[in-house]
Amino acid sequence: MTDKNGRYTKGIIDIGTNSCRLFIAEVMKTEKGIDILNELIKEVEIVKLGEGVNENHFLKEEAIERTVECLKKYKETADKYNVKELKAFATSATRDAENREKFMKKVRELGIEIKCISGEEEAKLNFLGNSLVFNDRILVIDIGGGSTEFTLGKNNEIDFIKSIDIGAVRATEKFFSQDDYSQENIEKCKEWVRKNIEEIKKIKNEEFKAVGVAGTATTQISVKKEMKIYDSQQVHMSEISVKELEENLELFISKSIEERKEIIGLEPKRADVIIAGTIILITILKELNKEKIIVSESDNLTGAMIKEEKMSERLEWILEAYESFKRSSKRRLVAGNIFDYFMQDFRGEISDAYDSATKEEIKEDIKEMADIIYNEEDKHKREFLVRILVNIVKML
């Protein structure tokens, strides 16, 4: 519920390859966008949704069940905080999975709005989350379970953006599936990373600070500081050198997986992927000629929290959903079902957005949809879009 000052409670869920994270905050819409007034809660749970996806491109049933159970708890938490707006975005594992719609349907049945975002979108959210923290030119590096995102820029201006399919889970399954961290396997992993980041190396001579976000980076600080209880405030804006990262790596490799679970500062459920993640991070920094990295707690969750979606972006969501069902033999029925789902979700939001919009802005949104409809050759998709446009006009 929004109060008279425009404040409301918003929840964001990041459904990653290895973990699910929840962020709930009190926010307020302003002329410049959305401001975070009060961070209410942050939670993380290792669910390993992407287990095996790199090999067979399918989400395992047990992985889906683990993730859905986690999301049920997140939904209950959101309800306790009277969250007005709860949204989830899924990343690399869901992008790669051929059965992603089955998983996403289960999430929607919980009453959670979900979108599978591209690697570039993920990178933009990471940068947005850090654009308010740093005044310098930065390269935000997000080593996830299935992919790594790179975003270079300053303030709100992005100069370079890239998502590459190298991640801690993907590398572990590819090189260390038997928990065999021989020098040969480690060198193969390093070479794989170097080969995949050729395009990134083009910026190594430019001026920027390296900023690390997400679990691989934050774990390095919690291990370095021997945190018995994770403290995000101690982690945020801490620096760690390549030499210290190599010391962490030696510590991780010297122990069995069960022994790694006992390392102070290391989340036990990360024990199986932390070595691969650390190798990726060290290799990237060396290839970019960087001796250290700043670790930030502002990441894609923060970016998604402060991102205000425009009507055109909401339209993209609808079109993406339609495209995912394009091969269906029952297109008309599918289009209707997607329409019903999205319009239920958008109805109040569109009305709220247009309460403060000018007539010219409304006309521009309608014109945008009309142009898309006019140029759409697919009859069923055209009918689908017309239904949406008619309902938007009715709501005004």
Image (cartoon, grey):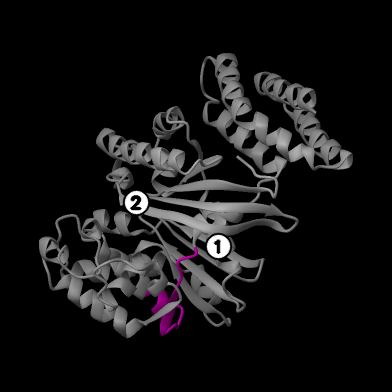
Q: Which mark is residue 19?
A: 2
- Residue type at mark 1 is Gly
Q: Nearer the viewer, residue 328 or 349?
A: 349
Q: Is residue 347 magenta?
A: no
Q: Which residue is mark 1?
A: 129
Using residue 296 as the reference point, say whether residue 53 is left or right of it: left
| Vertical side of 316 occupied by 325: above or below | above
- Quick one: quadrant of the N terminus? top right
Res 154 quadrant in image: bottom right
Element assignment for label 2: strand
x and y, in percent, of residue 236 in the image? 44, 72
| Vertical side of 117 occupied by 122: above or below | below
Span colored in magenta: 283-298
x and y, in percent, of residue 78 in the image? 45, 42
The answer to whether residue 146 is visible is no
Q: Nearer the viewer, residue 22 or 203?
A: 22
- Residue name at image x 45 percent, y 47 percent: 13
Res 295 quadrant in image: bottom left
- Residue name at image x 86 percent, y 42 percent: 358
| Vertical side of 387 occupied by 223: above or below | below
Q: Nearer the viewer, residue 4 or 252?
A: 4
- Residue name at image x 64 percent, y 42 percent: 2
| Vertical side of 327 occupied by 242: above or below | below
